[in-house]
């Protein structure tokens, strides 16, 4: 019976839905995390009686047909790139992006990865690095013994050198944008890689040409909303149960058939 | 003599199909923009096979069951706020138009994306059409705003004034029941049906239209179908027993 298989596709889809939701909830407090959602589509239909077919030689046509659907499929788990709220941290190397753009990080193998997580640190050479120790691009080196590190909205890093009263600009942190942010590939560690779907990375300067601005001493929180996730979780769970109910009802029907004419 | 069996069977076959329709509705309970299907049955009078042992002198026709149609329930699905600027829900009878390799298709699923060419596409990657064809955004566009009539405006670069990008094409149909479900949340236009511009529907940005499958209704129908099927099975069983007893009794040779 087709209903069993149809309901099984529904159960599989809801299982994946719960998986996506649980990952969102698990990353509720992950800096710069962007939530995902599961997008579903119906499967191909079996047109048992085709709508619009000729019903007689008088030219009358069937106003409605018999269409049997085959269930549901997952078409993707697009990421919702909405802005997360900014949380002041007081740490001078925490940067949040307000608006478009990603920080560009150089990976150990020389490739680049992109992130919205601006909780940076300084390494032994004085470079600004991310939590994995990979330098933020373009590389900014903070001179030894300097003080009063400030990062302005354009990403310019300035410090006050010993014996000087005016701040000196030591570098500028750039931003990178993509035409299709949702097409970026997540590689873990809050990092994304560009893909053919995301389009080529376009480097630029914060607060210009539609790029967002940088907020020093702030971190961008995850854009996951607990209430939405929990209500989605309940909906997914109920949908799973209902599909299971369909399987057991179809099973009862099959049982009735197999017990006929004992 | 075997009419009970055949009539019962005709009902069981339609019940199985109805079950398939319910299963598909339930499987798509979380599919955005999905419209539930309903089954219609009709009595099918068997013109030749007649039962002549009813009331004396009377011929009665036998009624079989035929599943005549499944029809789409185009009731509005509940809008769900997602706050995603590329989610659009239609309030009214309208449909979005997407360009597929097979031609124009229609959908109620307003969960859109932007592709590498900056075009507005649906989840399958098909271009969403505006009044002047595909809708393309520039790289410096931000703050995409979709008005209730489908006009898409953006803030371009450092501009303070909105630039109009396109207007979403919304259509409705003279005979929506003739729309054919193609899968992937798409409908194709059936024969004798025409797409006409829809001016009455309004759009809501940041909302997505959920499936209009009503879980309670589907569960009640499910139980109804399942029980009816079992009842017919037991009715056929009784008929079978009746025959067997008759044969046993009649074939008994008196000692």
Image (cartoon, rainbow, N blue to C red):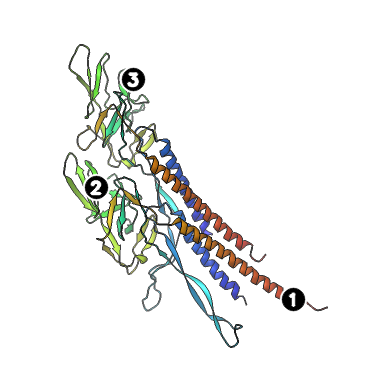
Query: Do the residues indicated by labels 2 and 3 lie within the same chain of the protein?
Result: no
Residue B107, quarter of the rendered image: bottom left
A88 relative to B248 in the view: left or right? left
Q: Nearer the viewer, mark 1 or mark 3?
A: 1
Location of mark 1 (residue)? B249
Judging by the rendered image, the residue that carries numbered circle 2 is B145
Residue at image coords 66%, 66%: A261
Give the SS element for disc 3: loop
Q: Residue furthest bottom?
A: B57
What residue is disc 3 on?
Answer: A123
Which x, y percent locates residue B222?
51, 60
- Are the residues tagged 2 and 3 within 8 Å (C-beta)? no
Evaluate whether label 1 is on the same chain as label 3: no
The answer to whether residue A209 of the structure is visible from this angle is: yes
Mark 2 → mark 3, Cα distance in angstroms: 43 Å
In the rendered image of this protein, does residue A246 appear above or below residue A158? below
Residues behind callouts 2 and 1 on a single chain: yes
Residue A70 shows in the view: no
Tell me which corner region of the image, top left, top right, bottom left or bottom right, holds residue A134.
top left
Which chain contains the residue that carries disc 3?
A
């Amino acid at each position: 019976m087709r209903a069993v298989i149809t309901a099984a596709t529904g159960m599989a889809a809801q299982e994946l839905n719960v998986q996506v939701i649980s990952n969102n909830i698990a990353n509720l407090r992950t800096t710069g995390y962007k939530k995902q959602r599961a997008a579903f589509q119906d499967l191909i239909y079996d047109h048992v009686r085709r709508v619009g077919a000729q019903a007689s030689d008088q030219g009358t046509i069937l106003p409605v047909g018999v269409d049997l659907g085959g269930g549901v499929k997952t078409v993707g788990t697009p990421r919702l790139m909405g802005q997360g709220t900014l949380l002041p941290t007081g740490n001078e190397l925490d940067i949040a992006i307000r608006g478009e753009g990603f920080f560009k990080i150089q990976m150990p193998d020389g490739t680049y990865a992109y992130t919205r997580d601006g909780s940076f640190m300084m390494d032994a050479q004085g470079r600004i690095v991310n939590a994995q120790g990979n330098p933020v691009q373009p590389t900014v080196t903070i001179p030894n013994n300097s003080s009063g590190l400030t990062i302005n909205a354009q990403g310019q890093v300035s410090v006050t050198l010993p014996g000087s009263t005016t701040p000196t600009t030591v570098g500028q942190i750039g931003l990178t944008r993509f035409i299709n942010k949702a097409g970026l590939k997540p590689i873990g560690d809050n990092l994304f890689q560009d893909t053919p779907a995301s389009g080529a990375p376009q480097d630029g300067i914060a607060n210009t040409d539609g790029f967002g601005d940088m907020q020093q001493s702030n971190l961008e929180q995850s854009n996951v909303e607990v209430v939405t996730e929990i209500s989605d979780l309940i909906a997914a769970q109920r949908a799973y149960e209902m599909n299971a109910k369909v399987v057991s009802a179809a099973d009862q029907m099959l049982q009735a058939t197999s017990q006929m004419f004992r | 003599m075997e009419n009970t069996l055949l009539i019962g069977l005709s009902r069981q076959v339609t019940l199985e199909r109805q079950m398939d329709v319910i299963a598909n509705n339930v499987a798509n309970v979380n599919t955005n923009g999905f419209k539930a299907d309903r089954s219609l049955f009709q009595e099918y009078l068997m013109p030749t096979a007649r039962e002549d042992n009813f009331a004396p002198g009377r011929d009665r026709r036998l009624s079989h069951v035929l599943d005549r149609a499944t029809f789409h329930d185009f009731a509005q699905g509940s809008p769900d706020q997602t706050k995603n600027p590329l989610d659009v829900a239609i309030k009214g009878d309208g449909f979005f138009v997407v360009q597929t390799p097979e031609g124009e298709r229609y959908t109620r699923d307003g969960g859109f994306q932007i592709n590498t060419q900056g075009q507005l596409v649906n989840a399958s990657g098909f271009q969403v059409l505006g009044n002047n064809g595909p809708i393309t955004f520039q790289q410096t566009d931000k703050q995409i705003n979709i008005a209730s009539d489908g006009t898409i405006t953006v803030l371009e670069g450092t501009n303070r004034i909105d630039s109009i990008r396109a207007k979403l094409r919304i259509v409705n149909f003279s005979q929506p029941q003739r729309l054919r479900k193609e899968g992937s949340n798409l409908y194709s236009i059936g024969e004798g049906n025409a797409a006409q511009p829809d001016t009455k529907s309004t759009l809501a940005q940041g909302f997505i239209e959920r499936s209009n499958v009503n879980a309670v209704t589907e569960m009640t129908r499910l139980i109804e179908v399942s029980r009816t099927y079992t009842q017919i099975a037991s009715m056929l069983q009784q008929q079978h027993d009746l025959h067997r007893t008759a044969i046993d009794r009649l074939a008994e040779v008196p000692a």
